[in-house]
Image (cartoon, rainbow, N blue to C red):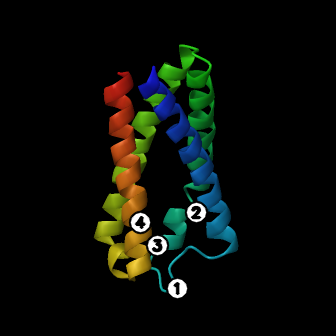
């Protein structure tokens, strides 16, 4: 039960974190100053799916905290989405030199990619 509570809290934080990332992206300029070709088009395709992922993770986290079995099912769906997101972003970033733009871009993007893949795997292993 303690493991599920930890996952639930991390799902809530991840869901809120995704929302805050996009607020920051569109307001304070989290995009690189000199992005590679196609970067903005690529990034602009993500607010809708990331928004849906945020809602999914928030619902899963709340339901897990309420001991509702649907929380586990939604968590597994979220795990798959996180894995896909993390690997897709990693693939784009490595192919387009995003990690090489600046130290801050490396740190931010690597953290996000590692978090998505690592947390997705953790959810799948601990709940599945």
Decide if residue 54 is on the left or right side of residue 104: right
Displayed quadrant of residue 15: top right
4 or 3: tag closer to the N-terminus: 3
1 or 3: tag closer to the N-terminus: 1
Q: Position of residue 124 (x, y in %)?
A: 35, 29
Residue to which mark 4 is pinned: 109
Residue to which mark 3 is pinned: 38
Element marked by disc 2: loop
Checking the image for residue 44, the label placed there is: 2
- The Cα–Cα distance between marks 3 and 2, rounded to whole angstroms, is 10 Å
2 or 1: tag closer to the N-terminus: 1
Q: Residue at x 42, y 27 (%)?
A: 3
Residue 118 visible in the current orientation: yes
Q: Are marks 4 and 3 in contact (CB under 8 Å)?
A: no
Residue to which mark 1 is pinned: 33
Q: Are marks 4 and 1 in contact (CB under 8 Å)?
A: no
Displayed quadrant of residue 44: bottom right
């Amino acid at each position: 039960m303690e493991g599920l509570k930890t996952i639930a809290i991390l799902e809530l934080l991840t869901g809120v974190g995704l929302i805050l990332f996009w607020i920051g992206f569109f307001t304070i300029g989290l995009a690189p100053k000199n992005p590679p070709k196609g970067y903005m088009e690529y990034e602009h395709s993500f607010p809708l799916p990331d928004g849906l992922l945020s809602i999914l993770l928030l619902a899963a986290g709340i339901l897990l905290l309420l001991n509702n079995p649907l929380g586990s099912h939604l968590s597994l769906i979220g795990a798959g989405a996180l894995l896909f997101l993390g690997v897709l972003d990693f693939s784009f970033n490595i192919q387009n030199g995003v990690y090489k733009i600046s130290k801050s871009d490396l740190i931010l993007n690597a953290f996000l990619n590692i978090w998505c893949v690592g947390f997705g795997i953790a959810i799948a292993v601990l709940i599945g």
